[in-house]
Image (spheres, rainbow, N blue to C red):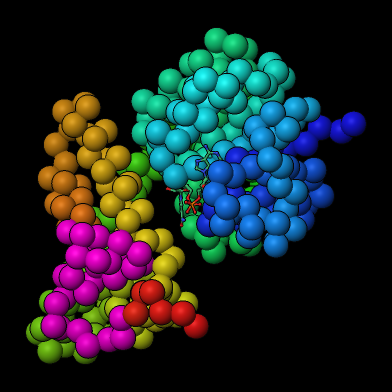
Amino acid sequence: MSKHIAFIGVGNMGNPMAQQLVNAGKQVKVFDVSEKAIKIAKETGLNVVNSLDELLSNSSAVISMLPEGKHVQELYLGENGVLTKISQDSLIIECSTIDIETSLKIGDHAKSLGIKMIDAPVTGGVMGARVGKLNFLVGGSQEAVKLATPILEIMGQKILHAGEQGSGVGVKICNNMSLGISMIAASETLMLAKRLKMDIKKVHQIVKEASGNNWALANYTPIPGLTDGVPSNNKYRPGFTAAMMKKDLKLANDAANSVNANTPLGKAALKIFSDFCEEGDADTDYSGISKKIGGDTWDYPFDPKGKD
Ligand code: NAD
């Protein structure tokens, strides 16, 4: 019997990632603990199994895509966890955005059992997952990364190897701290221009060509009518939620505290996104932070929970 890929966590990201593997002709079995995720997985044609034992028996690789470090720790290191059930020739590809410490703890344990593991969190969001164009930020040995690459290439467009185990989540955390700060900077820039009664389209065009440009301003513009296909043009329906950005900024803040790194803008961004979430906008796309920054400057439609 040929070996299959075991996919754990088929939520918003995991489901389309697993589907890319199936579409590429891979044998894939999936497992989740949520009834909703299982129902959607079945509807979308994924081969859902009922237990970790069934999932892991005769698997060649394990891919996980879970919400947070505590879930990932329990999955791998818990009593009857994955590491008690797989053989030495299995490869672990852990894709969740989690803290470096948990990633290292699992990686060290796997290594002590002779099991190869990489951490491979992603950028590109649900849209990237649906079209197989994620970017994988990878940490692990050259050997493990080489083994994982043919699988990652099915789900992603760029495989960016950052260093040893834990480096993938490390670079993801640093990247998203920068992204959270940049989204606020883009929102402040456009809000100021509007308050100065400038032509907002011209300001956007010019800053994109000038030294004040950043990725959020140019490609994920937080104000409607300036860039096609972004959540600001779709009433701020996500996309990438404010709750997720808050989670990543918290990871960055905890990481900074753990090494005594001075990150005042990272801390300010965490506070701004936390307040936004507490005010009822956790499910809004993170570019909706422009509403909080701009206040009554803007009168654009804002309906993140609406349904088309
Ligand atoms: P999600 O909540 O939609 O999916 C996670 C799934 O994991 C859920 O279906 C949940 O039931 C399942 N799960 C939790 N514990 C489990 C366990 N022990 N066994 C089996 N299944 C379990 O989350 P998501 O949006 O798919 O995000 C997953 C990860 O990807 C997160 O770490 C997130 O930060 C990261 N990420 C998300 C995006 C995005 O745009 N959604 C972008 C980049 C990175």
Is 160 or 293 nearer to us in this picture? 293
Question: What quarter of the picture does the N terminus occupy?
Answer: top right
**Residue 107: image location, x then y, percent:** 50, 21
Q: Residue furthest left?
A: 196
Q: Is residue 228 above or below residue 266?
A: below
Task: Identify the image quadrant of residue 70.
Answer: top left
Q: Is residue 257 above or below residue 241?
A: above
**Residue 65: image location, x then y, percent:** 53, 43
Is 36 or 109 nearer to us in this picture? 36
Specify the principal SS of the magenta part. helix
Region of the chain picked out in magenta, as a range: 275-302
Q: Residue furthest top?
A: 112
**Residue 288: image location, x then y, percent:** 29, 70
Q: Residue at x 72, y 53 (%)?
A: 46
Q: Is residue 288 magenta?
A: yes
Q: Is residue 224 magenta?
A: no
Q: Residue furthest right?
A: 1
Q: Residue at x 55, y 14 (%)?
A: 111
Q: Is residue 128 above or below residue 297?
A: above
Instruction: Decide if residue 197 is on the left or right side of residue 12.
Output: left
Q: Residue at x 47, y 33 (%)?
A: 72
